[in-house]
Image (cartoon, rainbow, N blue to C red):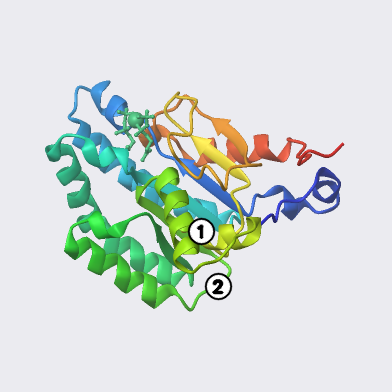
Amino acid sequence: MNTAVDNKDKKTSPAACVPAHVAIIMDGNGRWAKSRLMPRSYGHLKGMERMIGLLEHAFDVGVRYVTVYALSTENLSRPKEEVDALFGLFRKYFNEYARKIIERESRLCILGDVTALPSDIQDMVAEIESQSRRFEGRCVNIALNYGARDEIVRAVNLAAERGEKVDKESFSSLLYTGGQPDPDLIIRTGKEKRLSNFLLWQAAYAELYFSDKMFPAFSDKDFDAALKDYASRERRFGKV
Ligand code: IPE
Ligand code: IPE
Ligand code: MG
């Protein structure tokens, strides 16, 4: 689905300069910690705190859908100690943050294969997904054990099981993001310039923004700078 506005609309409506859906590849926690002679887990802790602040800020400035890439399918193959530390942080912060989501009457969706996660985490996320399902208009997607290739293969299999032929719209609806607008803007922190298996289908016409800042150092002002850059882009969607 495409909700993006063209440049002509942007000029007539300032609110249209704010992307409806921003997705963030939160990269650089480990290098940020290393540069401070701290363990990688400290970088993840600071990254988690920054993520919560940034999600609040994104809603404050009018973004309606925010997707954060918290853990890729590939990240699960990192050393057990690191993966366990990430799950520990999730356990510590999730409920507190989930309450904020509910207070702001927004929806929480998990993108990814949750069945491979520890069972207590599966229970935590299922509870908030069901509590927040009634809210419309604002949504936080947390990509957790997410891989775009897995997501696409899963959608193909769902269609095959139903014996359905798909078109672009019906295929989109089978993805984890089914029913949501595609991301207008994808921000990646941490200097790398790649998508690392993130939203490969949904990113077809997303604007890309790369920041050299490591994620724990990516401030609200840096986010605003990304939105400003986005507002200056001309989105043509293949047209003239
Ligand atoms: C991103 O930071 C967070 C996760 C992938 C979980 P990294 O852990 O990839 O940090 P760098 O890229 O090694 O610095
Ligand atoms: C992408 O970062 C995944 C997340 C931010 C969760 P990675 O650190 O895993 O990506 P690569 O390995 O640099 O491509
Ligand atoms: Mg990384």
Kindly state the secondary structure of the residue where label 1 is placed: loop
Q: Dividing the picture into quarters, in which one does residue 109 lie?
A: bottom left
Location of residue 41 by image quarter = top left
Tell me the number on the disc at residue 61.
none
Amino acid at the residue labelled 2 = Glu
The residue positioned farthest toward the front in the image shown: 163
Image position, residue 167 (x, y; %): 64, 58
Ligand 3, seen in the image, is in the quarter at top left
Q: Amino acid at mark 1?
A: Thr
Asked whether, in this view, residue 114 is left or right of residue 5, the answer is left
Residue at 72% in and 48% down: 17
Task: Find residue 164 and report its horizontal and vertical position in percent.
Answer: 55, 66
Residue receiving disc 1: 177
Q: Residue at x 81, y 54 (%)?
A: 13
Quick check: 72 above or below 29?
below
Task: Give coordinates of residue 79: x percent, y percent.
Answer: 16, 34
